[in-house]
Image (cartoon, coloured by chain):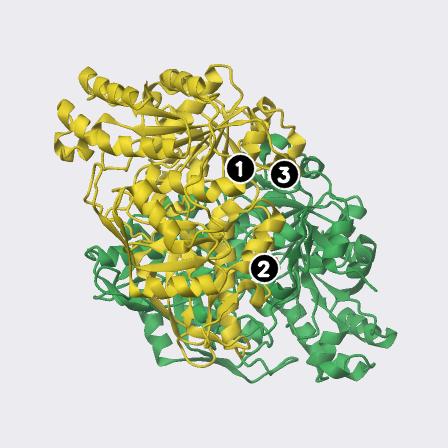
Chain colours: A green, B yellow
Amino acid sequence: MSLSDIEIAQQTEMEPIEKIAQKINLESDHLELYGKYKAKIDFETLEKSQEGSTGKLILVTAINPTPAGEGKSTVTIGLADALSRLGKSTMIALREPSLGPTMGIKGGAAGGGYAQVVPMEDINLHFTGDMHAITAANNALSALIDNHIFQGNELLIDSRRVIWKRVVDLNDRALRHVTIGLGGPLQGVPREDGFDITVASEIMAILCLATSLKDLKKRLSKIVVGYTYQRQPVTVKDLKVEGALTLLLKDAIKPNLVQTLEHTPALVHGGPFANIAHGCNSVLATRTALHLADYTVTEAGFGADLGAEKFLDIKVPQLKKAPDVVVVVATIRALKMHGGVPKSNLASENVEAVKIGFSNLQKHIENMQSYGLPVVVAINEFVSDTVAEVQMVKEKCLALGVEAALTSVWEKGSEGGVALAEAVLAEIDHTQVFSPLYDTDNETIETKVTKIVQKIYGGKGVAFSKKALTQMKNFEENGWGNLPICMAKTQYSLSDDPSLLGRPSDFIVTIREFVPKLGAGFIVALTGDVMTMPGLPKQPAALNMDVAEDGTVSGLF
Amino acid sequence: MSLSDIEIAQQTEMEPIEKIAQKINLESDHLELYGKYKAKIDFETLEKSQEGSTGKLILVTAINPTPAGEGKSTVTIGLADALSRLGKSTMIALREPSLGPTMGIKGGAAGGGYAQVVPMEDINLHFTGDMHAITAANNALSALIDNHIFQGNELLIDSRRVIWKRVVDLNDRALRHVTIGLGGPLQGVPREDGFDITVASEIMAILCLATSLKDLKKRLSKIVVGYTYQRQPVTVKDLKVEGALTLLLKDAIKPNLVQTLEHTPALVHGGPFANIAHGCNSVLATRTALHLADYTVTEAGFGADLGAEKFLDIKVPQLKKAPDVVVVVATIRALKMHGGVPKSNLASENVEAVKIGFSNLQKHIENMQSYGLPVVVAINEFVSDTVAEVQMVKEKCLALGVEAALTSVWEKGSEGGVALAEAVLAEIDHTQVFSPLYDTDNETIETKVTKIVQKIYGGKGVAFSKKALTQMKNFEENGWGNLPICMAKTQYSLSDDPSLLGRPSDFIVTIREFVPKLGAGFIVALTGDVMTMPGLPKQPAALNMDVAEDGTVSGLF
């Protein structure tokens, strides 16, 4: 019987975090310890990392996810361990997980098998408190807004047009739609409201894009919380609480240092949604890793059409550094699903389905190449893969000028990632010129959305709802036209229809509505319904969790 | 111009927390560091502390609070510093503050002036994340309850009779009364609900009364979350989530070690409300302090009628150790208010008012003596106090066989607490037999409530509402009759009428309703309306808060 993730993690002896820091020449003076195996990096180091560096950046992304699973985080961690194994000074920059899914659905967010970041119990639970600080700051702002309205409403905020929602870091369906302020005139002003999960908070996106404490405060001040009766935007600055919110985030902004099972240093910091936000770990963590190590392996959420596109068009301008190589993760099983095979039939060989499903991978490879970036494909091995199936993928990749490397880091750790690491190293010095998809400052919202849909998704065009058309006009008038676009779209398809697998064409993407995220510094474009508060399943993972008298955890994946 | 609390704190150089731990012979192996100046104590030390100890316990309590202020926490900290100054091995066990009041009203909860626990910014903000862990556990339970109802409701929970409320660690008036689960059949089951502030959560009370991780889990399993359609109680155990909740609290249960401005070791851990809960720091922290130091100074919330009574009748049975001496804090100004002087006239000498107001102090002294405990009075000095006023208090104390010591720790630190420390040391070896107010196991709820009202408050008797009478009958039938009583009453008066200062008599206390807190292990008796979710003032303290680029905090008191 194979071991569970938590059993593997518990069997591994961690090194003290000071020793991990030594590997990247970070003295313990610059660490703020959280127990023996976690530390935050101090402001001095963060400031130094702003000076730029010669570190190489490897972005791991994937095909459109399927129920078959791709293992992107696992490959990210395993690749970094393999680079370390080859003697390269390497760091990881990863997102930190949300407590909500942890309590709901089995499945860790800190890698798996023999490619994990540890201590996985802590990382999956409260970690260093970043999520809680964001929750507190988000909800403090909500309390301050409702208190402002209650105490005379000097800013004339229209209580029907408050767009700032409360959050909890839980899957709590019952909080999606609520009415608050009930109970009479002494208890508040009644209005409709709703709760999102913490990772959907704009404050999470802000924390992940901020380049310093000063920049954090500036971004927080720009948040639009709602509108006046005259439809004028009301900001955090109008409420005069950007100082208090920054104060609540002064530790959360510092990246968290942990380690992999093989003791590669890893920064696990920030975790915005990849639909209504940009889905990457913090700019500060990535920048710090680039400063401290020669090679940084990082990851973008969902498939490359969402995660990598946003990494390149939203995060890179803040990071001031484009990836040196992009790794696109795929599995034979997932390619078969993109080729039309149902989940129940994935175990039998089907080279033809792999060939058809490859179209999805091919589109993502072409997209990354269109940014001027070298690409390597990682085929994340499963026992059911056959030689002929793997051969088909390798050949088709070669035809696109891309190497495809088999990886088995889940089963074997770094040893299973050496082929991929070597392929990455072979590509990483081919300097090419990074070419952004659109001109953020000078193109209109409509042009930017259209470029994403046509060039990245491969769609025919965009249909804007009446509301979206009005919003585009208002936003441009407000001076918000020069922001990048953050698409909120299904992750399962290149189109906005989750059932269209492979490489759909001739489709139109409908933009239902825009949401201004002035603090994060992007405009969200909503395609369909976007779930910002997940629910729990009938048998939540919480039912299996336990902790022994000595503090040993069980049932956590 | 005198310095603010935060300025004094920032001017003081803290010692590394390992050095503080050395003072109480605690090796750094037993510390889980949170930065350089905070640490949690490990399970091994907590377990050892269960073996009992010869440490002496000093309980600091006060007269009924007035707007004039008493400075109970400040005296607690200053007394401990003074004992240290006299060469005694001393620790402090204090409650940790809630973020809600911090954002709302100026005024720290970590002492003041030259008697503070530090790092005060951290202690007043996220600290080591205990509050956030409690919030997460509380709200995870809420999400699991609503999910159970949504997913078929096998336990037949009556959604109108869910008594478990959600919490936020904020002052958020608008969340007092809400409706949740709106939006149609896919979004939840609509019901009325409300949010409390985190410190009002039963989980906070449980964390503070639990004697081990095992006991914590047992207590969590007993929480009554609501009732079935047949009016049968539904518990956490029925939902099978006590393991998950314990897991979320596995670090929060460990006491937090910090230091005073004069480097006395302090455990700051847990902070339940003193109205609907028992208002004392955790049993584990107090026990650990008793194990590690010769003298432990601790504090109870509000006046002695609420805080000390609950300390003695609810906490002591879990702690298995009664105080060796009780310090009752009073100020001349507050005694004048109890003597009928309005706040605006407190600056002028008024010996007669002091004499009349002394009746309040006298009742609390007599109450503590009725438990068989030695008493010392601390007169917390203000500049406006006159010699004649102080003399009046000292004489009246002496008539009761009690010494009254002047303290000026806010202004002078430990030096200002030496007289009090000497008075405490003079009393501490007078062993007397602790005599509890009531027989928890064998007396009825009605008898226990009546004893509190008649013997501690000095009232004539108790009026139970019709609902309360029915509940007493049901609770005794459910087997809950053998629990101690936790009175929820105004802190401003010995009676249940906040306007009755001094020592009222001939009053009847009305019990409106009971609330079973099976996990905490007590029955709450509600007198009037109890505020479990505060609101923000028109100019919240948050408006003045800020943080500089290097992380330096300002505007926090």
Kindly identify which residue carries mark 2.
B242
Circle number at residue A81 = none
CB under 8 Å between callouts 3 and 1?
Answer: no
The mark nearer the N terminus, 3 or 1, is 3
Of circles 2 and 3, the one toward us is 2
Q: Residue at x 43, y 59 (%)?
A: B516
Position above or below: A145 against A64: above
The mark nearer the N terminus, 2 or 1, is 2
Question: Gap between marks 3 and 1, in whole Å?
Answer: 12 Å
Q: Quadrant of the N terminus of chain A?
A: bottom right
Kindly identify which residue carries mark 3.
B42
Where's residue B411, x and y in %? 32, 21
User: Quick check: can you spot residue A519?
Assistant: no
Element assignment for label 2: helix
Q: Residue at x 62, y 41 (%)?
A: A291
Residues B314 and A328: in front is B314
Q: Which amino acid type is shown beneath numbered disc 3?
A: Asp
Kindly identify which residue carries mark 1.
B285
The mark nearer the N terminus, 2 or 3, is 3
Where's residue B373, x and y in %? 42, 30
Element assignment for label 3: loop
- Horizontal side, residue A195 vs residue A364: left or right: left
The chain that hosts pointer 2 is: B
